[in-house]
Amino acid sequence: MSDVIKDLSELRLSYEQGELHEAQVSDNPHLQFLNWFNHALTANLHEPYAMSLATANTQGRPHVRTVLLRGATEAGYDFYTNYDSQKGLDLLQNPVAELLFYWPSLERQVRIGGQVVKISEQESMDYYHKRPRDSQIAAHISTPQSGVIESRELLQQRFQNLQNQAQTDELDKPEFWGGYRLEADYYEFWQGRPNRLHDRLSYEKQNGLWSIQRLMP
Ligand SMILES: Cc1cc2nc3c(=O)[nH]c(=O)nc-3n(C[C@H](O)[C@H](O)[C@H](O)COP(=O)(O)O)c2cc1C
C-alpha cells in the first residue's frame, strides 16, 4: 500500500454544466427543490436521494452521516432511522438539522435546514411495512444503532435467529424505529461555475414569506 499522497492542489475541475439565475428559479423553494431533484432522478445518478444529515448535540459537537430521503412534500423532508441512534440522541437534545445533497455530475449542491420532528407512528408503520422483510428484521436486531457490537458473527446470528423465528408472522415495527421530518426554513441552491464564480441562491423564511438572496461564492 502506498503511503504517498498525490499533490492534491493539482486536482481541480472547472464547473461548466449550468447556470442558476434569479429569473429562472421558483419563488417557492420546495418547488425549486423538486425541479432539481426530479432532474437528478432522471439523470442516471447513483442514489440521488441519498443525502448528508448534519446534527449537533447541546455541546455543539456536530455529527454527519448519509441517510435516504423517503418523502418530500411542502410539510418537509422525511427519513427513517433508529430513534436510539446517535442522530436520535442529537435530535432529542437539539431538534435542528441540515440536509445536504451533492450531485457531482450535475455540479449541483442543495442545503436544506430546519426544525426536525418525529413523523406520526402511523406514517412510520406504513413505511416500515413497505420495506423488504430482511430490512424489517435488520431494524429489529440492530439496536441501539451506533452502539458497539462484539463481532460480525454475533450480528449475523441475531439476524438468523429472528429470521427463523419470524418465518411466517408479520413483524411489528419496533418502537425505537421510525421517521423524522425536517421542516425547512432555509434552502441554498448551488450551481458550479467556471473560475470558482459559482451561483448560490439562498431562500430564508421571514414572517411566513420566502426571500431569495444571491450569496458570494
Ligand atoms: C448510502 C447510505 C444510505 C444510508 N441510509 C440510511 C438511512 O436511511 N437511515 C439510517 O438510519 N442510516 C442510513 N445509513 C447509515 C448512516 O449513514 C449511519 O451510519 C447510521 O444511521 C448511524 O448514524 P448515527 O450513528 O450518526 O446515528 C446510510 C448510509 C449510507 C452510506
Image (cartoon, helix red, strand yellow):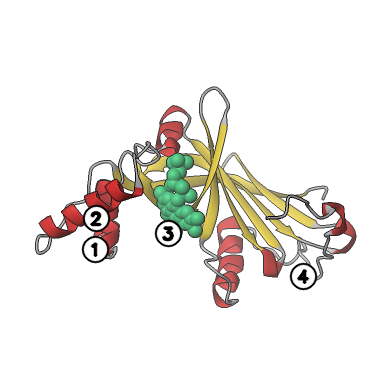
Q: Amino acid at mark 3?
A: Gly
Q: Residue at x 45, y 38 (%)?
A: 87
Q: CA distance from mark 4 to mark 3?
A: 27 Å
Q: Could you give the CA–CA distance between mark 4 and mark 2, rounded to whole angstroms?
A: 44 Å
Asked if labels 2 and 1 touch by Cβ distance under 8 angstroms, the answer is yes
Q: Quadrant of the N terminus?
A: bottom right
Residue at image mark 4: 18
- Name the residue that disc number 2 marks: 137
Rendering quarter of residue 103: bottom right
Camera-nearest label, 1 or 4? 1
Compared with 68, 59 (above or below) is above
**Distance between the Cα atoms at labels 1 and 4?**
42 Å
- Of mark 4 and mark 2, the one earlier in the sequence is 4
Indicate which label's residue lies in the foreground, 4 or 2.
2
State the separation of the CA atoms marked 3 and 2: 22 Å
Residue 69 relative to residue 205: left or right: left
Q: Secondary structure at mark 4?
A: loop
The answer to whether marks 1 and 3 mark residues whose Cβ atoms lie closer than 8 Å is no
Question: How far is mark 1 from mark 2, CA to CA?
Answer: 6 Å
Residue 6 visible to an observer of this rendering: yes
Q: Nearer the viewer, mark 1 or mark 3?
A: 1
Mark with earlier residue (1, 4): 4
- The residue tagged 1 is 133
Q: Position of residue 55 (x, y in %)?
A: 53, 37
Residue beneath disc 3 = 71
- Identify the residue at horizontal 34%, vertical 36% (top origin): 84
Q: Nearer the viewer, residue 144 or 100?
A: 144
Query: Which amino acid, mark 1?
Result: Arg
